[in-house]
Image (cartoon, grey):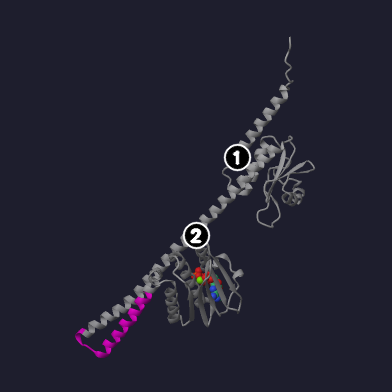
Amino acid sequence: MLRRVLPMVDTASVLDEAQRRSRELDTLHRLAEAVSDALRGEDVLTRSLTALLEMGWFTCGEALLRREDHRPLQAVSVGLCPFDPLGECPKRPDLVARGDQVLAEGRVVRHGEWLLVPVDDVAMLALSGGQEVSEGFLGAVTDVIRASLKHAHLLQRLAEKEQQRSRLLQAFLTAQEEERGRISRDLHDQIGQALTGILLGLDQNLDRPDAHSLSQLKELAAVTLADVRRIALDLRHSVLDELGLEAGIRRYARDVHERYGLDVSVLVNLPSRLDRQEEIVLYRVVQEGLTNIVRHATARHGSVVVTSYNSYVQCVVEDDGIGFRPEALLPGEQVGLMGMRERLEVLGGSLRIESELGQGTALYARLPVR
Ligand SMILES: Nc1ncnc2c1ncn2[C@@H]1O[C@H](COP(=O)(O)OP(=O)(O)OP(=O)(O)O)[C@@H](O)[C@H]1O
Ligand SMILES: [Mg+2]
């Protein structure tokens, strides 16, 4: 009788292989869970390393990260060294020194007892001890970590945008409150008092009409009317809505001239009207720029030039005053300038400040246009 010859199967090694695969899958699952809600690159790397050590693949490891372009690599896995849990891994300086080369080469490198594993072009794991790992498993591990780093980076950018948005909202609300306060003071102090004076004068004239006093009252009424016009002008958004950016800027420049004597030339060259938001932002830049000239520049002359280019509109507010050193300002000393910059950036634009002591100041505000 013919017996079929079956190939010999090493049951033990098949079982081993199955167990190893199962542990690999468990590890990947654990890894993905550990990093799923990490918001910072450091956390992604430290948690990944912890998971790999706890699953027994390695006995020791370091996570290295370059936080910003051109900065040296830094170890972010402080406290994970099993030989010195409170302190630093004694091998760290050596690993950091090799790190740049490994990141540049972009492939796993053996370095003594260490396995140096680049995750992406700014992050690296250094692993040592434990068991042999397959290339496929190591590749899957780095894929998970790389995806989580990207995710964390996006979340961080989102959080920054959210912070910027709430700062802007706060600044907007404060500005609105200040403006209301100013208008209320103007109405109370100027218009209220002037009208009271007119009323009292008219009362006296009802009994004994007097041509000279009536002519004074008429003059006072005319001045009051001019004040009312100015206050109405300050409610700038409606001015912009009705007249557009160019007329709004011209009226603001004229007002600055009348109030503070500053000579301001205006040149606006726009083929058509911009979006309402864009007009408001540029008008705000002009307002803050001219107010700064009046308050800080001791200038003889100011100018506003708005020009349209292919893909953007540029607004330059310039003076021939004393100038300043923008780089020397602390964050708390440039709330006005920062507000300008943030408003522009929300619409995808930018602000450049050119100024030097004794050389005047120029603000270049740019907004992209469709
Ligand atoms: N045109 C300018 N000429 C000279 N110095 C200027 C000019 N514009 C700004 N500066 C300097 O930059 C600083 C910051 O300006 P910024 O508008 O941010 O704040 P501020 O005008 O002092 O206060 P505010 O928050 O009320 O605007 C000013 O305090 C001033 O020292
Ligand atoms: Mg200011």
Q: Position of residue 23 (x, y in %)?
A: 66, 32
Is 286 left or right of 219, judged from the image as shown? right
> Which three-letter amino acid code belongs to the residue tagged 2?
Arg
Q: Main secondary structure of the magenta part?
A: helix
Q: Which residues are magenta?
A: 206-231
Residue beneath the point at 26% across and 81% down: 200
Is residue 68 shown to the viewer in this render? yes
What is the distance, in whole Å, between disc 2 and disc 1 at their CAs?
Answer: 34 Å
Q: Secondary structure at mark 1?
A: helix
Q: Position of residue 35 (x, y in %)?
A: 60, 42
Q: Which residue is mark 1?
A: 32
> Which three-letter amino acid code belongs to the residue tagged 1?
Ala
Residue 167 image label: 2
Label 2 CB-ligand 1 distance < 8 A: no
Instruction: Give the camera-side residue of 7 and 184.
Output: 7
Is 213 left or right of 285, judged from the image as shown? left
